[in-house]
Image: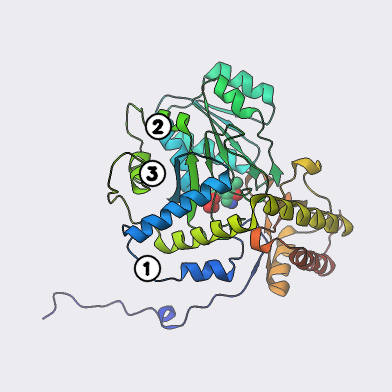
Amino acid sequence: RAMSSVNIPPPECMLRPLEVPYRYLFGPGPSNVPPRILAAGARPIIGHLHTEMYEIMNDIKRGIQYAFQTNNHMTLAMSGSGHTAMECAVFNTVEPGESVLVSINGVWGERVAEIAERMGKLHICKLSNCRDQIDQHTSKHKPVLFFLTHGESSAGLAHPVDNVGDLCLRHNCLFLVDSVASLGASPLLMDQQKIDILYTGSQKALNAPPGTAPISFNERACHKMFNRKIKPVSYLLDMTHLSNYWGNDSKSAREYHHTGPVSGFFALRESLAILAEKGLENSWRQHREVAEYLWKGIEDLGLKLFIKDKDLRLPSVTTIAIPDGYDWKELLAYMMKHHQVEMTGGLGPSIGMVIRVGLMGYNCSKFNADKALTALADALKHCPKRRG
Ligand code: PMP
């Protein structure tokens, strides 16, 4: 006699096949994944600790070093989305009681401020983008870490990073940069721009599925995180373990820490290979050209771009000011229903202010820009426009 019997029946939905529509992912991410990367992710699974997997992980490291333009030995991919890399960077380099300086130019600074705040008694200084302010705040609060978002996807802003690294170095503070929305689309040179820690995501211009996040630490960052008095709060994100898992420490063997997303790593390797074949400069140029084409098309529709200064616009994610009289949710719903085109509204401080259009990597073509513009024009024509 069974000790217990199954009294919850198999759910109806599980007896129906999986259905996934085809969508044109022209929002801020994830972007469409090209067949070559999908095929890489569909390869048979091997063990996460097999020698062949180590080779693939080593390739990924080399691919990230190229994409980031860094010679940093401590380069790897996080098992998780962009947030995992964000938390990894903060948790490993900051100890309770130390202060963190966060530049807030949109939602991502707010997020990192919240992550840092959760760790204990930290002084969070919120400031915008002025260099004098950074100097002033670093002198006053002596932060161990300064955070800046390079590609602010909520605002559509490409934040300049030149000279900030020097400033941080002078104040003995680590310079942490988020390039989730900009890597591969907007020029960024980790070593030359003296960025101490840089991370990105797999699902934007790299066109891999969501779920892995490249990150790199330079010597200065390694010195800080491997000379801590107390261990970081997270076991999963502890870099002493992760550096071993990625073969980056001095131990001769890699030991089990967690089971990495094997298929996600296959796909990430393929996406980095595509970027290496194409070349970073070509990728930057393509994003800029297509963005300029899109910006002109948007203005020709009578719409206004949210970031006025062309040089500060992010080429991967464009923000359009919501046109007067329209309900942005209706515009987005119309484009999804009639064109299978995804665009999104704002995020955090930009909610209700913008519509975001992302043409990244595989999606970055004039053909797709035209597709996005056609959907927008059609939505403007058919959605109700209210007066006043
Ligand atoms: N930073 C930026 C600039 C982003 O655009 C995003 C994703 N929209 C993230 C961080 C977070 O990445 P994820 O959603 O992969 O956790």
Query: What residue lies at 78% left-to-right and 54% top-to-bottom?
Result: 289
C-alpha separation, residue under disc 1 versus residue under disc 2: 33 Å
Residue bearing the label numbered 2: 225
Residues at badges 1 and 3 in contact (C-beta under 8 Å)? Answer: no
Q: Quadrant of residue 341?
A: bottom right
For the N terminus, the quadrant is: bottom left
User: Amino acid type of disc 1?
Assistant: Ile
Residue bearing the label numbered 1: 45
Q: How is the image coloured?
A: rainbow
In the picture provided, is 58 more to the left or to the right than 102? left
Give the image location of residue 56, x and y in percent.
42, 58
User: Amino acid type of disc 2?
Assistant: Met
The crowd level at tag 2 (other Cα within 10 Å; few <14, some 14-19, many 20+) is many
Say which of 299 and 48 sits in front: 48
Give the image location of residue 181, x and y in percent.
62, 49
Precedes in sequence: disc 2 or disc 3: 2
Residue bearing the label numbered 3: 237
User: Amino acid type of disc 3?
Assistant: Leu
Say which of 260 and 373 sits in front: 260
C-alpha separation, residue under disc 1 versus residue under disc 3: 24 Å
Mark in front: 2 vs 3 = 2
Query: What residue lies at 83% left-to-right and 57% top-to-bottom?
Result: 298
Give the image location of residue 146, x and y in percent.
55, 30
The crowd level at tag 1 (other Cα within 10 Å; few <14, some 14-19, many 20+) is few
Ligand 1 within 8 Å of the CB at mark 1 = no
C-alpha separation, residue under disc 2 versus residue under disc 3: 12 Å
Mark in front: 1 vs 2 = 1
Q: Secondary structure at mark 1?
A: loop
Precedes in sequence: disc 1 or disc 2: 1
Say which of 4 and 86 sits in front: 86
